[in-house]
Image: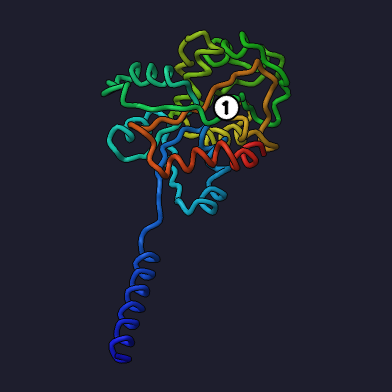
Amino acid sequence: MKGTMSFKMAVMGMAVLTAVMLSSAAPADEITVGAGAAPTENVFNKIKGPFEKASGVTLTLVSNGPEAALKDLDKGLLDAATGGVTFQDWMEMMEKGGYKIPDKNAYKYRVIGKDIIKVIVNKENPVKKLSKEQLKEIFTGKTLNWKAVGGKDMPITVVWGNKIPGTNSVFQKQVMAGEPYAKKVQESTTAPEIKKVVASTPGAIGLAPLSLVDGAIAAPEIPEVGRPITLITKGAPSPAVLKMLDFIRGEGQKYLSK
């Protein structure tokens, strides 16, 4: 009898040990989110660490802009796509770019934050304020020298980011009355890269989210250019994405406000 009991206990012990080992070896939840400049800088860079610690979910960011993010979402490569643009404007931006939306009704979207677009210039630039009309003239290429807007006699270099289409689209709509950007620009990529170029180029001007403004560059006073930060999923959000959304709405607010 004792031998039978000992055998059963040994078997049970082995079963528990195996379950613990399997549990520890199982991969943790992971979500992959495609993001433009606004959600990357204003939301995900701020909540990533605290969210992973609180939830046990690994958050992987693919900062490739909203256009690429939506395409990757349609391919099943992402759990969610995010951009600093309204859902309607996002759809219009994709269609203008020649991308045929497979099925708009398949998308679920919600606003997870807000961003303010700032105009940034080299920190040695003395210009402290720019009107909407002045900005329009600069970014369309009609004003070519800082002297025309109260600055030094110095050529204007418009730094244009090819990986911030959401930022470009919102600024073009709200400030430039839909007119095209200047043909002669210095191409860059992401908002942080634009900031680097502006910081090292005396006559440069570019666009960046408010969160990137610091002592490395200057940000003249301009009319407010705001936009929502939108998250899209294909179908209902996964449980892990829902965890992230709950975190952003709840505990995450204390990190977003910093």
Front one among 114 and 182: 114
Q: Residue at x 27, y 21 (%)?
A: 100
Left or right of residue 190, residue 78 in this image: left
For the N terminus, the image quarter is bottom left
Left or right of residue 26, residue 130 in this image: right
Left or right of residue 44, residue 90 in this image: left
For the C terminus, the image quarter is top right
Q: Residue at x 32, y 22 (%)?
A: 105
Picture coordinates of residue 188, whole percent (x, y): 47, 32
Q: Is residue 126 visible?
A: yes
Q: Is residue 185 visible?
A: no
Q: Is residue 158 above or below residue 64?
A: above
Picture coordinates of residue 89, whole percent (x, y): 43, 17
* Secondary structure category for the residue under label 1: strand
Identity, as a three-letter code, of the amino acid under mark 1: Lys
Q: Is residue 207 above or below residue 26?
A: above
The quadrant where residue 6 appears: bottom left
The quadrant where residue 118 appears: top right
Picture coordinates of residue 150, whole percent (x, y): 71, 14
Q: Residues within 10 Å of mark 1 (few under 14, many from 20)?
A: some
For disc 1, the marked residue is 114
Q: Residue at x 37, y 70 (%)?
A: 21
Q: Residue at x 29, y 38 (%)?
A: 76
